[in-house]
Image (tube, helix red, strand yellow):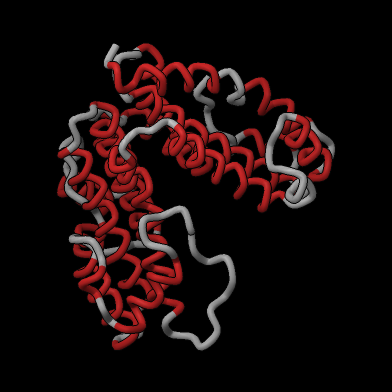
């Protein structure tokens, strides 16, 4: 085993036993109320004494625990940067929109990122785009022009979301770690498929789709966009000829099934890392598995808060890593 990962992988193996299985998620769904769900989670060590009565605070605390664990593993943090890009670009989008108002709403930023929310807001307000990482500065300036000058909120979103996908794919392809490359390919391809599906439903133009989609080696943006113009059946037919055929099957079932497949695809991508103990793979896989776990718990809590029937919640929950 590579010496630099010996301790990290051993620590992760010990932590994996506490990950929620599909059976545990079933138990959570079976709880009779939102409050019972919080009690169930607290009994399993989620949150802390200050968050036991507040679901969102509990989930936020669990996110903090993930990165606290990563820091304790003494692995170069640059190895994990690509995994935080979506949050970093979310902060950019939030900052651009917040710059338009006098009072910034609370809790709109992620703080566990390379650039904090307040710093991002300062950069946008001062138009000091040179302080942003390469690949983000141009998108920030274009997004500001789109929203602040042209008043086009949708174009602002498209510019930033596309820049995020480009950054993820670039970082992934430049990584020496297989799991990061696989993660980047999967994230970008799934995002492109989502864009095509939603664009088809809202009758967007091919120019819109190509502006929103990021180039990806495992899927053809051109063919996918043309398929979206032809209708849902054409999208499914195209996907059936790719490694994302599962998305076609999910689309045939329902939109809920499709959204679930999109997240499950990431879990399916990282699952083989369980058996690759000589690399950083198990560490990255654990981090992504925890994020997926938190997302799934958030879906359940939201369903319970809205008093949805168990069946409606179950069709939305994600596949677990263990």
- In depth, the one of 154 and 15 nearer the eye is 15
Q: Image check: 301 left or right of 60?
A: right
* Residue at (40% x, 75% y) in the render: 121
Any part of residue 39 in sight: yes
Is 137 placed above or below 270 here?
Answer: below
Is 32 placed above or below 26 here?
Answer: below
- In depth, the one of 224 and 82 nearer the eye is 82
Q: Image check: 280 left or right of 262?
A: left
Quarter of the rendering containing residue 23: top right
Q: Position of residue 215 (x, y in %)?
A: 17, 48
Q: Position of residue 31 (x, y in %)?
A: 80, 33
Q: Position of residue 15 (x, y in %)?
A: 55, 22
Q: Position of residue 62 (x, y in %)?
A: 60, 42
Quarter of the rendering containing residue 115: bottom left
- In depth, the one of 315 and 216 nearer the eye is 216
The N terminus appears in which quarter of the rendering? Answer: top left
* Residue at (38% x, 78% y) in the render: 122
- In depth, the one of 254 and 73 nearer the eye is 73
Numbered marks: total: 0
Any part of residue 272 in sight: no
């Amino acid at each position: 085993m590579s010496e630099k990962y010996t301790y990290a992988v051993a620590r992760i193996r010990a932590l994996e036993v506490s990950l929620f299985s599909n059976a545990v998620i079933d138990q959570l769904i079976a709880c009779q109320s939102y409050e019972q769900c919080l009690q169930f989670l607290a009994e399993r060590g989620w949150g802390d004494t200050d968050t036991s009565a507040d679901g969102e605070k509990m989930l936020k605390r669990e996110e903090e625990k993930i990165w606290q664990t990563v820091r304790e593993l003494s692995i170069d943090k640059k190895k994990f940067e690509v995994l935080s890009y979506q949050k970093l670009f979310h902060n950019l989008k939030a900052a651009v929109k917040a710059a338009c108002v006098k009072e910034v709403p609370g809790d709109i930023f992620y703080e566990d990122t390379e650039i904090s929310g307040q710093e991002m807001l300062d950069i946008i307000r001062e138009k000091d785009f040179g302080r942003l990482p390469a690949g983000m500065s141009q998108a920030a300036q274009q997004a500001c022009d789109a929203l602040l000058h042209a008043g086009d909120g949708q174009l602002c979103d498209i510019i930033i979301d596309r820049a995020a996908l480009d950054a993820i794919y670039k970082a992934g392809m430049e990584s020496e770690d297989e799991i990061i490359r696989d993660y980047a390919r999967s994230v970008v391809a799934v995002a492109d498929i989502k864009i095509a599906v939603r664009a088809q439903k809202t009758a967007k133009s091919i120019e819109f789709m190509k502006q929103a989609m990021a180039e990806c080696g495992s899927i053809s943006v051109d063919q996918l966009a043309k398929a979206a113009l032809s209708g849902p059946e054409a999208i499914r037919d195209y996907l059936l000829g790719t490694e994302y055929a599962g998305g076609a099957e999910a689309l045939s079932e329902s939109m809920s099934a499709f959204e679930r497949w999109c997240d499950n695809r990431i879990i399916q991508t990282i699952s083989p890392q369980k058996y690759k103990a000589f690399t950083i793979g198990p560490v990255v896989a654990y981090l992504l598995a925890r994020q997926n776990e938190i997302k799934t718990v958030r879906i359940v809590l939201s369903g319970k808060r809205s008093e949805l029937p168990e069946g409606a919640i179950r069709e939305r929950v994600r596949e677990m890593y263990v």
